[in-house]
Structure formats: structure tokens, C-alpha cells
Amino acid sequence: MTKRLEGRILAGAVRSRVCSRVTAGLRAGASTPPGLLMIRVGEDPASISYVRGKEKAAAETGIVSRVEVLDLSTSEAVLLARIAEANRDPAIHGLLVQWPLPKQIRPEAASEAIDPAKDVDGLHPYNLGRLALGRPSIVPCTPLGILALLHAGRVPVAGARVVVLGRSQIVGRPLSLLLGVKADWADATVTTAHSHSRGLVNLAREADILVAAIGRPGAVTAEMVKPGATVVDVGIHRLDDPAAPKGVRIVGDVDAAGVEPVAGWLTPVPGGVGPLTVAMLLANTMEAWERACGVIGPATWMEACGLIPEGPGSGELVSGGLGE
């Protein structure tokens, strides 16, 4: 019987850990609480919902969040100037620009304008470059959430054959790099597949851990899953369905009904990866704040992913560490 890798309870535990570290930092004399600025351009309904969820989660942990909404007609130059101001603001420790952006603004220009030390989405070339070198610093949030789910479920990662379906900058590429890091919590053999990969069905069936991040509802079917494999569904889609509550049914990239009898583990949609993406944003903000305050200790994201025990000094308990 397929087991569920539930994200909601784990995300709550991550928020609790972040809250504890915020409290400890303020008691230790930090002059300001961690500050998170989220910039949204336009009124995209999905973006509004995502940012609102991030605000709510931040408030639960003691992180002071703020949302700035710019008009849909905002030029790239104006956005970059605002980012430069936020980079100089000592009260802002985490900074993100919510995607999607209007066509006149290049997403890569916005990502590259953010100070790498405040890049809590982990999308700046500096942070992605460190990840590629096997020396992760600030890591993209969704890959961190997936890593946390795998370890919480005690899914073996070291030595496992992982196939990541999708090569986006936000999920596919950084996840492939993260799971391939030379460390006792990773060390997987990772293949990144995409729409032009030959023999995709057979390739997917080789995976001990199959990650679906391709952006098409129900694209991963039972024939693509090795019996007993762990299947992680990153997708989230809203489909019209008159029989569903409010006329909308939420599904992922995986045909859950077909895959469930085959897989050993499966993340639900909703309630799997999504809540952890937000929780890891808070962990990254916490880490950026601690670094700005001069705190030297175990990486917040490693603690949030369950890779090290919770509490001061726990960094000494990590076996293996990072390597080239």
C-alpha cells in the first residue's frame, strides 16, 4: 500500500524551529527581527494567493514581512532601482520578487539584481553556482522542501537512482544538483530528463525516486513508475470540474489514482511539497538574518530539512559534511 509523504505537519515543524531561532536570536541581543520584503508586479491571482500565504507563515515565526505591489506597467529599470534600495536597507534580510513578471521585465535581471546574501529564493547565479560546486549556501526553496520530505519519510537517498522530470531554474536544475551533492544526506545518482529526452517512460521507470516537475497535469502515469518507487509531485494545477467543491479540482503532474497502486511513497497534491516550499523560504530568511547579525552556527536549512539535530552546536554532529 502506498504511503503518503505529507508536507503540512512537517512544514509546521519547520516553522516552529524557525520561530525558536528567531526568539533565541532576539534574546541574544539582535537589534532587529528578521525582515522579509516581497515585491509583486501586477495583480496575478495566483501570485496574490502565494504571497498572502507567505505573509501568514512569516507572521507565525516572528519574521517581519512586507509586500510591495508595483503596477503591471512598471519598467524593468524601476524594479531594479527598487531592488537596489532594498539591498541597502539593513532592516531587510530576505528579498524576493514574485514570479511571473510582466513581459517587459526579464526574470533573470530581477534575480541577478538581488544581493546574494538576501536572495532567499536561492536563484542568484552566486547561490546556484555554490550549489553546482557542491558547497550550498542559500538553496532554492522547493528543492529544500523535497529533501526534507525524503528525509522525514526515511526514504534512502544516498546511492539511490533519482530521475527529475523537468529542468527549470526553480526546481529541476537545483534539485538535481542538491541531491547529487557529496554528503551523507545526498549522494544520489541523478538524471535530469525533459520533453526532448529519448525513451522517457523507460528512463522514469529506472528511478528509485521519481520527481515530477514538468508543469503538465497528470503527465506521469503508472507505466512510468517502478513498483515501490518514491514519487514526488511538484506540480499544482487548477482544473474546472463542476462536480468538485467551488467547481475547481486541484491536481499535480502525477496521475495520482493510477500511480498510487504502484508507488511505495507518493506526495499528495495539495498538501505535499507546497507547504514546505513556503516553510523553507522562512528558513532561508532566518539564515540570512543570522548571517547579517554575525551568528555562526549550523545552516538553518540543514536543521529545517532534518539533516542535523535541532539546537545550538548541532553542526558538529553532521557526519561527512560537504565535499567536492
Image: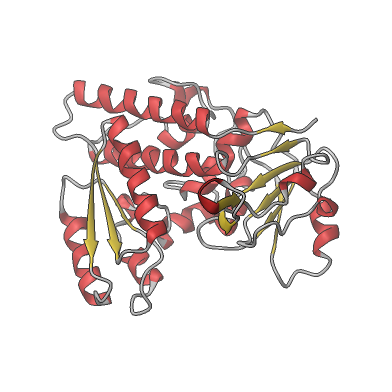
Identify the image quadrant of residue 167.
bottom right
Work out whether residue 302 or residue 40 is closer to the camera in this orientation and state it.
40
Q: Is residue 252 visible?
A: yes
Work out whether residue 316 or residue 85 is closer to the camera in this orientation and state it.
85
Q: Residue at x 40, y 21 (%)?
A: 313
Q: Which residue is drawn at 52% across and 43% down?
A: 144
Answer with left or right where residue 270 lies relative to residue 204: left
Residue at the bottom extreme?
104
Identify the image quadrant of residue 296.
top left
Residue 106 drawn above or below residue 182 = below
Q: Position of residue 41 (x, y in %)?
A: 29, 66
Q: Which residue is drawn at 86% across and 41% down?
A: 227
Q: Where is residue 17 in the image (x, y as percent from the top left)?
A: 39, 25
Identify the image quadrant of residue 110.
bottom left
Answer with left or right where residue 122 lies relative to residue 36: right
Q: In which quadrant is the N terminus drawn? A: top right
Q: Where is residue 77 in the image (x, y as percent from the top left)?
A: 23, 76
Q: Can residue 286 be seen in this view?
A: no
Residue at the front extreme?
242
Answer with left or right where residue 292 lies relative to residue 161: left
Q: Position of residue 283 (x, y in %)?
A: 39, 37
Residue 40 drawn above or below residue 52 = below
